[in-house]
Image (cartoon, rainbow, N blue to C red):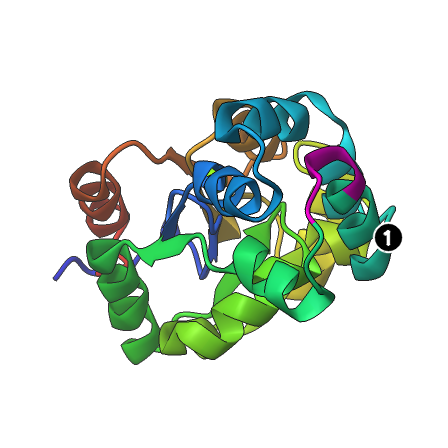
Amino acid sequence: MSPTSSLTPTAVVFDLGKVLLEFDYGIVARRLAAHSGRDAEQIRGLLDQSSLLFRFESGGMTNDEFFREVSAVSGYTGGFDEFADIFGDIFTAIHSMIELHAQLHARGVPTFIFSNTNDLAVRHIRVNFPFFSGFTDYIYSHEAGMMKPDHRIYEIVEHRTGRTGAMLLYIDDRLENVEAGASRGWRVVHHQTPEQTIAAVRAMGLL
Ligand SMILES: [Mg+2]
């Protein structure tokens, strides 16, 4: 254990996708393809090239609007509940990072989720991943109405955490996101492997 100092952040902000949970939208394309009889790669291309997911995760579409538009482009003919399962069930746990969160939580370090995400994903994750209930607060793009790395959503994080600058440690796998945090004076870890991230958190005196 390292002694804490004035340089030790007092809260940790976690990105979700590819930091705490792995995800694969290819799974969505394959499942939609199984329903529509269309080619999964073609559906994947339609989803990737469309602005649908961006609009959904920016808070610009309701669940029902997203459901209707994806159904239209993919040929999906099933109902909403099954669609919600198809879109939600794409996540797998990254156990070593979930354990890192558990250790911080056990030490009383406030922890926050800061994610570009959507309501279907959050509903699914809440039900299926117990660790997810253990954060102090949650800042979601679809609720904020803007996505990382828009600087305004970082201001929301500062407001909700009650912290600024080097009091915050932020972990994200996307370089443009961590750079936006670093430009505000936040301590950052560009997440690439759990081993490197855990070592960096330890070096800051949080473990
Ligand atoms: Mg991510």
Task: Give the camera-side residue of 152 and 80.
Answer: 80
Q: Quadrant of the C terminus?
A: bottom left
Image height of 68 relative to 196, above or below: below
For image coordinates 71% across by 40% down, the residue present is 75
Left/right placement of residue 162 relative to residue 181 reads: right
Q: Secondary structure at mark 1?
A: helix
Point out residue 7 in the picture as x, y percentages from the top left corner: 38, 48
Left/right placement of residue 181 relative to residue 174 reads: right
Write down the quadrant of residue 177 in the picture.
top right
Image height of 167 relative to 160, above or below: above
Q: Amino acid at mark 1?
A: Glu
Left/right placement of residue 18 relative to residue 185 reads: left
Task: Give the camera-side residue of 38 and 140.
Answer: 38
Point out residue 53 in the picture as x, y percentages from the top left corner: 70, 38
Residue 75: say if magenta: yes
Residue occupied by mark 1: 65
Point out residue 68 in the picture as x, y percentages from the top left corner: 82, 50
> Which residues are drawn in magenta?
72-76
Outermost residue to the left: 1
Image height of 83 relative to 192, above or below: below
Residue 12: say if magenta: no
Task: Give the camera-side residue of 116 and 127.
Answer: 127
For image coordinates 54% across by 39% down, the residue present is 33
The crowding category of the residue bearing disc 1, from other C-alpha atoms within 10 Å (few below 14, some 14 to 19, many at least 20), is: few
For image coordinates 46% across by 46% down, the residue present is 17
